[in-house]
Amino acid sequence: MSMLNLRHLIDDMKANLRVITAFDFSYKGKNYVVVCEDISKQPDEEKPKKYKYYIAKLTFIDYNDESRTLTVLANTKYFDGVSTAQFRAFFGIEYGNNLGDIFQQFYSYFSKSIPEQVPKNLNKTQTSSCVKQLNQKKGETDGQYCFNVFRNGKDSKQRQKHRSCYNADKARLLRPTLFNHFKKDSTISFCFTTDKSKEKKDLELIHIFAEREKN
């Protein structure tokens, strides 16, 4: 298996209840952030049938030009979801009769950059790249500034609602101390906005939540 490390990383993400993480990758003089998502966490209605053959969605983002991105589906053997031409163009791989060998060499080289465990600390670019991906998920709002913490109610069938794995990871990335305070209660979610002026500090949010719970 060319990318066995990817299996180890996804397994560690599952064990630590993570749906997304990121790491760096360098190839042919260019540096990339690689956002790694556990696709088993995708809601069923958003999950194409072919997802069952893959374990991760990887988004490569050029450090020098964040508009240059490439998203692929991946298992431990190969990538899918883009054409060979797109893949070659993005990574600057010249055409040759031995493309199969070149791809295997790429996968083996890439595997060396894949951490076997979820990185404990992400840098600013890695964090913002993960947040941008999370903002695109169904039910999640744009923004990076936390302004409210609330307890979820019940649905129309009186079943308790819980925060999504996306909301949990976003809070974990952007407000780790606040998240750790509430993480054991999955009925509590975090609200974010693009308006920095509305952002509240941890103690203020904890106090407001506690006062609301008294009523």
Image (cartoon, rainbow, N blue to C red):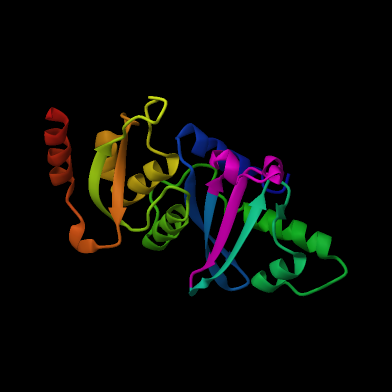
Q: In this view, does 144 lie to the left or right of 63?
A: left
Q: Quadrant of the C terminus?
A: top left
Question: Quick one: which residue is furthest to the right in this view?
Answer: 97
Residue 65 drawn above or below residue 42:
below
Provide the residue span drawn in magenta.
37-63
Residue sitting at x 15%, y 35%: 212
Residue sitting at x 37%, y 37%: 163
Location of residue 179 (image quadrant): top left
Q: Which percent across, then down, holds residue 137?
A: 47, 51
* Along the viewing direction, whichever of 212 and 79 lies nearer the viewer: 212
Residue 35 lies within the magenta run = no
Q: Which percent across, then down, holds residue 90?
A: 65, 71
Residue sitting at x 71%, y 42%: 53
* Along the viewing direction, whichever of 108 and 42 lies nearer the viewer: 42
Q: In which quarter of the image is the N terminus?
A: top right
Residue 123 drawn above or below residue 206:
below
Question: Quick one: which residue is furthest to the top in this view?
Answer: 158
Residue 39 lies within the magenta run = yes
Location of residue 196 (image quadrant): bottom left
Total marks drawn? Answer: 0
Residue sitting at x 62%, y 44%: 47
